[in-house]
Image (cartoon, rainbow, N blue to C red):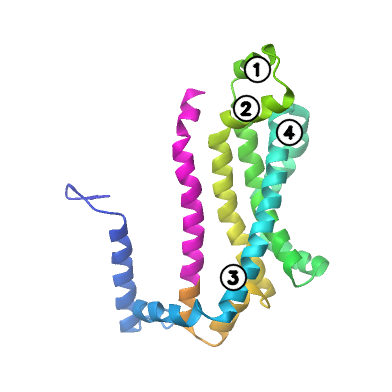
Amino acid sequence: MELRGYRVPMAFSLLVWFALWEVIGRLELVSLIPPFTDVLLAFREVVPTADFVEAATITLQAFVIGMALSFVLGFGVGFAMGRNRAVGSLMGMWVNIFESSPLTAIVPALMALLGFGLPTMIATVFLFSVWVIALDTQVGVERVSSSLVEMARSFGASKRALYFQILLRAALPELLAGIRLGLIRGMKGVVIGQLLIAVVGVGYLFELYSRSFLMPQFWALLIVLFTFAFLASEAVAYFERKVSFYASSR
């Protein structure tokens, strides 16, 4: 970011927003927004507590299991759709339907089927993230040059070598993009699922803080979640930039 010809660090924009937040909180313009300094102090009342550790453990467990299932099925379906036109035609419509649908409406049905617990949260993470992973994987596989595949076959490459040495590496930019978007949507899924259940995990803490009108604690917890999602996204984006030459070399 540049300001009057001078390069300004992106972190400066955060300082500006935090200062504006502090002013709004001090002036009490919005009752739901406390001063930012109060939110910082609330971190000591939220993060070190046993309730937060237990909620974070449940949330992380649901997120990790759900994302692992999304990666396995998303990559598998995406590769099949990219390599086989019949599978692409058969599955493409359904994947696009679920990708563009408001999946939040399905969560109550999952609660009725799976109960108010970990299985529902895992299923919510899975449903929110798997479709974008499958679509990006399909796009990446379809963009692999056919000459690379023909060359591998002419040298007697096995199907395993074809997939792992050629297709996987050539489609890496789209695969990483799918992982990054899937992580973001998976985080949305686990939070939405817990908010609707409101008896376990981070959703329970959000419900507790909002119901008790503990807004500094509410915003402190929200910042923790935003920070985790941002760091996970940036970690994958870092590897995306490292392999960006694959996209141009294809």
User: Is 151 located above or below residue 174 in the figure?
Assistant: above
Question: From the viewer's perspective, is the residue at label 3 or at label 4 nearer?
Answer: 3
Do we see residue 102 in this rendering?
A: no
Return the x and y of residue 211 as percentages of the image width and height: 57, 85
Amino acid tagged 3: Ala
Which residue occupies 45% across, 29% down? 245
* Local secondary structure at mark 1: helix
Mark 4, residue position: 80
Measured in 3D between alpha carbons, the distance from the residue under mark 1 to the one under mark 2, in whole angstroms, is 9 Å
Return the x and y of residue 140 as percentages of the image width and height: 60, 32
Measured in 3D between alpha carbons, the distance from the residue under mark 3 to the one under mark 1, in whole angstroms, is 46 Å
Mark 1, residue position: 152
* Local secondary structure at mark 4: helix
Do we see residue 52 in this rendering?
A: yes
Mark 2, residue position: 165
Question: Could you tell which of marks 2 and 3 lies nearer the N-terminus?
Answer: 3
Return the x and y of residue 139 as percentages of the image width and height: 61, 33
Q: Is residue 18 left or right of residue 64?
A: left
| Camera-side residue of 191 and 72 | 72
The magenta-colored residue range is 222-250
The reply to whether dot 1 and dot 2 touch (C-beta < 8 Å) is yes
Amino acid tagged 1: Ala
User: Is 224 located above or below residue 85 in the figure?
Assistant: below
